[in-house]
Amino acid sequence: PDRYRVTIKKEKAPPDRPELPPGKASGFFSDVVKEGDILDVKAPTGHFFLDMTKPNPVVLISGGAGITPMLSMANAIAASGSKREVWFFFGARNRSEHILKDEIQRLADAHDNIKVHVCYSRPSKEDVLGRDYHHASRVTVELMKQLLPSNNYEYFLCGNGAFMKTITDD
């Protein structure tokens, strides 16, 4: 509540185009900007936000760094004291790419109304089902159909282009 946090994934050159340079902006934030630096930024804008006046249940669907706005939404619901039903789906390849893992787990442990489902598409040998992740698969609409008690939810989706296309196409 006393600061802003941003999550920026340092982008490498695309695997299929290694001759391209890595991400300029993500590299700058990772390699140049340090704690305590002063940045000139603008307030968030747009239509992608959670209306806190609504009581209806929500489904937060994220992959990779797309977890950032979903975690903010879940934290806002928790901080408000609301018992609004929240289903939080997150996908990563494995624990090495599972950002904000401890924070998500603390949130789920502290709030019965927030149900977290972590999917690892390629769990490593060190990843433990039930501790690190809940499903050895990608986040899919089929998984949501199996778990959600109804389809009467407000859905929020954030992730890379391929992740978003797969979920919306399904």
Image (cartoon, rainbow, N blue to C red):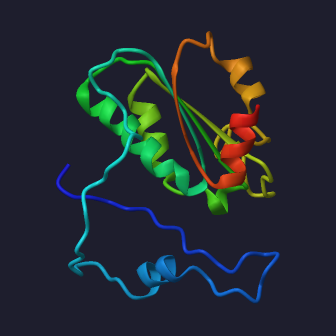
Question: What x and y, as percent, mark residue 75?
Answer: 35, 38
Q: Position of residue 46 (x, y in %)?
A: 36, 46
Q: Is residue 158 left or right of residue 85?
A: right
In this orientation, which residue lies closer to the viewer: 33 or 135?
A: 33
Q: Is residue 142 visible?
A: yes
Q: Position of residue 124 (x, y in %)?
A: 79, 58
Quadrant position of residue 50: top left
The one of 83 and 56 positioned closer to us in this rendering: 56
Left or right, 62 with reference to 124: left
- Residue reaching furthest front? 46
In this view of the protein, can residue 129 be seen by the observer? no
**Rendered image quadrant of residue 42:** bottom left
Q: Which residue appears farthest toward the left when viewing the image?
A: 2
Q: Is residue 14 above or below residue 3?
A: below
Q: Residue at 42% of width from left, 79% of height from top?
A: 29
From the viewer's perspective, tell me whether residue 134 is left or right of residue 110.
Answer: right
Residue 95 x %, y %: 66, 56
User: Total marks drawn?
Assistant: 0
Q: Quadrant of the C terminus?
A: top right
Question: From what the image shows, is residue 69 above or below residue 148?
Answer: below
- Quarter assignment of residue 32: bottom left
66 left or right of 117 in image: left
What residue do we see at 71% from left, 44% from top? Answer: 165
Q: Residue at x 41, y 37 (%)?
A: 107
Q: Is residue 77 shown above or below 39? A: above
Q: Nearer the viewer, residue 11 or 111?
A: 11
Task: Using the image as rendered, state which of residue 76 and residue 136 is in the foreground.
Answer: 76
